[in-house]
Image (cartoon, grey):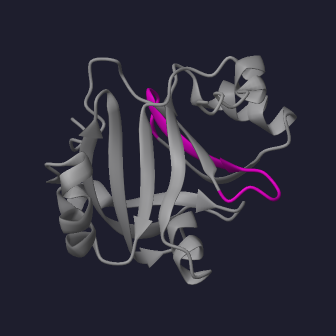
Amino acid sequence: MPTPVPDRKLFGELGLPQIAQIGFAVRDLDQSIAFYEPLFGPFKKAPPEFAVQQASYKGQPRSPYELAIAFGHSGDVEIELIQWVAGDTPHRDFLESGREGMHHVQFRVADCDEWVKKLNAAGYETVWYDRLRPDIAYAYMERPGDPLLVEFLEYPTSGDATEPLPD
């Protein structure tokens, strides 16, 4: 007999949109691309300027970080491979705790800050956040006892979040 689909009650109650991305924290981007390419490839590496940013981490002031990133797809779901390079990020903490693999799910939303408030009220804490422009922001959220982070990405609907930001 087939396994029943898990109850998505929490997410249903919150009214979250469809998952747009599944992010994996990896130790070696090139090895991970080779490993996951049969499942989610081909992968496209983000340009270096895309992966060097600043963000607030665990309530601290914005500070620089660097990640090496590649994107693939499974149907409409983007697969993001993230190698931590430098700075304070949840990816570094995840890898330093001895884990590697599925790290977060991303939801593209019209108003990142409203979703942050909604998940804060549901017991999630904002651990990583930045507003790059009035129309572009991201936030990583976590809840006690759950290793999977939730990311909200506010990005113009006509934009491709995998490309460098236009001026």
Q: Is residue 158 above or below residue 143?
A: above
What is the total number of numbered labels drawn onto the structure image? Answer: 0
Q: Where is residue 150 shown, x and y percent of the image?
A: 61, 44
Q: Where is residue 32 shown, x and y percent of the image?
A: 27, 68
Stretch in magenta: 132-147
Q: In the image, is residue 14 part of the stretch drawn in magenta? A: no
> What residue is at 25 percent from the left and 47 percent from the top?
40
Q: In the image, is residue 140 part of the stretch drawn in magenta? A: yes
- Is residue 46 shown to the viewer in this render? no
Quadrant housing residue 113: top right
Position of residue 122 in the picture relative to residue 78 (left or right) = right
Quadrant housing residue 84: bottom left
Check the picture and name the quadrant holding the C terminus: top left
> What residue is at 55 percent from the left and 75 percent from the top?
99
> What residue is at 43 percent from the left and 69 percent from the top?
65
> What residue is at 76 percent from the left and 34 percent from the top?
119
Check the picture and name the quadrant holding the N terminus: top right
- Is residue 27 shown to the viewer in this render? yes
Q: Where is residue 68 shown, x and y percent of the image?
A: 29, 66
Q: Where is residue 38 shown, x and y percent of the image?
A: 19, 54
Q: Is residue 116 above or below residue 58?
A: above
Q: Is residue 77 above or below residue 111?
A: below
Position of residue 134 in the picture relative to residue 30 (left or right) = right
